[in-house]
Amino acid sequence: MPEIAQKQINKWLITITVMLPTIMEIVDTSVANVALPHMQGSLNAGTDEVTWVLTSYLVSNAVILPMTGWLARMFGRKRFLITCIILFTLSSLLCGAAPNLATLIVFRILQGAAGGALIPTSQAILMETFPPKEQGMAMAIFGVGAMFGPIVGPALGGWITDNLNWRWIFYINIPIGIIAVAMATFFI
């Protein structure tokens, strides 16, 4: 009986573990929208130029998406997930420290590539964790978590930008990324 209880605990810990980087990635797709005018002023960029902060992230996110399954098979899902979380977190640090717009765009490309693989890899791990009869419930929970990001992102971005600095919309990912790596290491 203790083994069954342990499996129950583990699948919920794994659910929380894969939801953390997923929410971090989804929030990051919308959190920068609000900060664009602040970035524009700080980096001395035009409106057309500063929108590349968003575009570069989304394009690299989309480019990596079709390769995610193959990369996860090549390196192993757990190792690939942890690598993507580390790259996403490191690139978030670099985005926050970017001295100019060109550097910020390069780091956003790296961040988008790492982030693009987080959602499908997290979903695959979640599907492996739950038995077939509970997979619908697992995807519903995942969907609720995924909806959380676009709701919270703009409000969080506005609050951070108004009260701190636009760079903190990237720095906020660092503690979350560290926690996500630790949880993935121990629970997956």
Image (cartoon, rainbow, N blue to C red):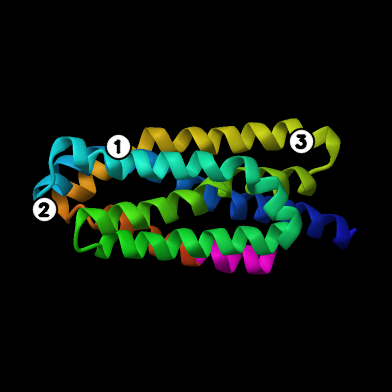
Please, is residue 89 above or below residue 120 in the view? below
| Element type where label 1 sits in the image | helix
Are there few (<14), some (14-19), or many (20+) residues within 10 Å of tag 3?
some
Sequence order check: which comes first, mark 1 or mark 2? 2
Disc 3, disc 1: CB below 8 Å?
Answer: no
Span of residues in magenta: 179-188
Quarter of the image holding residue 135?
A: top right
Residue 180 percent coordinates (x, y)? 54, 61
Q: Which residue corresponds to the image point at 72% horizontal and 49% vertical from the top-left?
A: 70
| Prevailing secondary structure of the magenta residues | helix
Residue on which the image places disc 2: 42
The residue tagged with tag 3: helix, strand or loop? helix
Identify the mark at residue 135; answer none if there is no mark: 3
Name the residue that disc number 1 marks.
154
Estimate the x, y position of residue 102 in percent, counting from the top left.
Answer: 25, 55
Q: Earlier in the sequence, mark 3 or mark 1?
A: 3
* SS state under label 2: helix
